[in-house]
Image (tube, grey):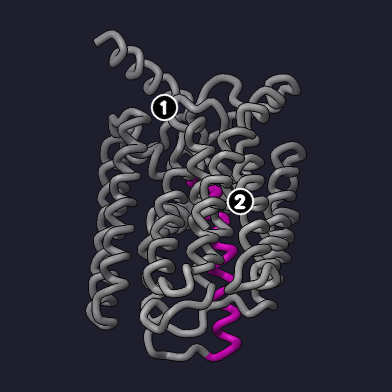
Amino acid sequence: MWWMIALSFLISVGVIPLIIMLCKKQGWYDKTNERKIHKGNIPRLGGVGIMLGFIISTIIYFSFSQTKSITNILPIIIAGLIIFIFALLDDFFNFPAKVKLFFQVLATVIVLCNNFRFTCIFNWQLPVWFSYVLSFFWIIGIINAFNLIDGLDALCGGLSLLIIGSLGVIFFCAEAIDASSSAAVCFIMAAAILGFLCYNRPPAKIFMGDGGSQIMGFMIAVLPLFDSTKNFNYNKLLVMIVLVSIPMLDTIAAMWRRTREHRSFMTADSRHIHHKLIALGFTKVQTLIFLLSIQTCLCLAAGLGMYLREDKGAILLFVVFVFMVAFYSSIHFIYYTVTNNKPVDIKDLQNETKAKGSKNSES
């Protein structure tokens, strides 16, 4: 497992400079829009490096694994490739929202047909039909939540690294005897993301693109659906809600905001959590550190809740989630108070951030 983790990192960190060169040669740059803060021409295909590192290392790992066959994870790989390939094509051709959703649904159905799903909440065994419905909306929702949160250098990648790494630790400790094949998948993916982050940290040299952000969301949604111990299964859904609370709450807020304003869910805007923090005076780097620090605390809370007694763990996780709701509501209230309930133009955010960066450099 450790060799494949190293291989995943080396492939990702080695391929991405070649991708940057290719993007610059072909003019494949990330276009600015209402929710993106960057200025200038930034290559956008970093997700290719992540996927190459993950796919190659995972296939090699399972080809030599004595605990599980490659067929156990093949549906995840196939579904992930569908998500990634068509999201990658979307970076070039800008498909209609219905086309994007179709391929997300197709990949989700492949996963569900191979029995990757939530089966219980606490000690309540879910009815089969409800299990499939819950898992379906979970996967679709998390894919799009991570796609929406990808608007700041290293934010989506940083959140994904912390969440997937935490899942890897949970799986590894729960299945220490057989070296944890599920943990291996998590750690291999985390290593590929880490290789990408070497070039995506502020100021970013490359972005992951929709292909990268959607595959991050897909893997985070699907990885907890692997088989695990009874202790993890008891609080699994609550653990995941806590781990993904930053992008999940941001997406719920965006859906409510666009419904209230009679706009399509697919329209972009500049009122995501990172936009609000920058509008309140944070620099881009401060915003990134702040959100990743919160995510680190969430990961620690999820790990502690996992290993407390089942009911005590559930109480801790519930309290943490309530805190996150209160935190997000407070940021929302302060933002609308400061801005007098008016959305901030993305150009203002870009110029303000640039000015602050210049001022910090001079000091």
Membership of 274 in magenta stretch:
no
Q: In the picture, residue 311 is in which quadrant?
A: bottom left
Dot 1 or dot 2: first in sequence order is 2
State the SS at label 1: helix
Name above or below for residue 61 compared with residue 277: below
Mark pair 1, 2: CA separation: 35 Å
The structure residue drawn at horizontal position 40% and vertical position 18%, both measured from the top left corner, is: 354
The stretch drawn in magenta includes residue 145 = yes
Question: Is residue 260 in view?
Answer: no
Badge 1: residue crowd in 10 Å (few <14, some 14–19, many ≥20)? many
Where does the magenta region start and end?
127-149
Confirm or deny contact between disc 1 and disc 2 (CB under 8 A): no
The x and y percentages for residue 182 are 52, 67
Residue 63: give x, y in percent of width and height: 68, 63
Mark number, residue 349: 1
In the structure shown, which secondary structural element does the residue marked by tag 2 occupy? Answer: helix
Vertical relation: 331 (above or below) 103: above
Foreground tag (1 vs 2): 2
In the drawing, does residue 188 fall left or right of residue 326? right
Q: Nearer the viewer, residue 47 or 137?
A: 47
Left or right, 50 with reference to 311: right
- The dot on residue 54 is 2
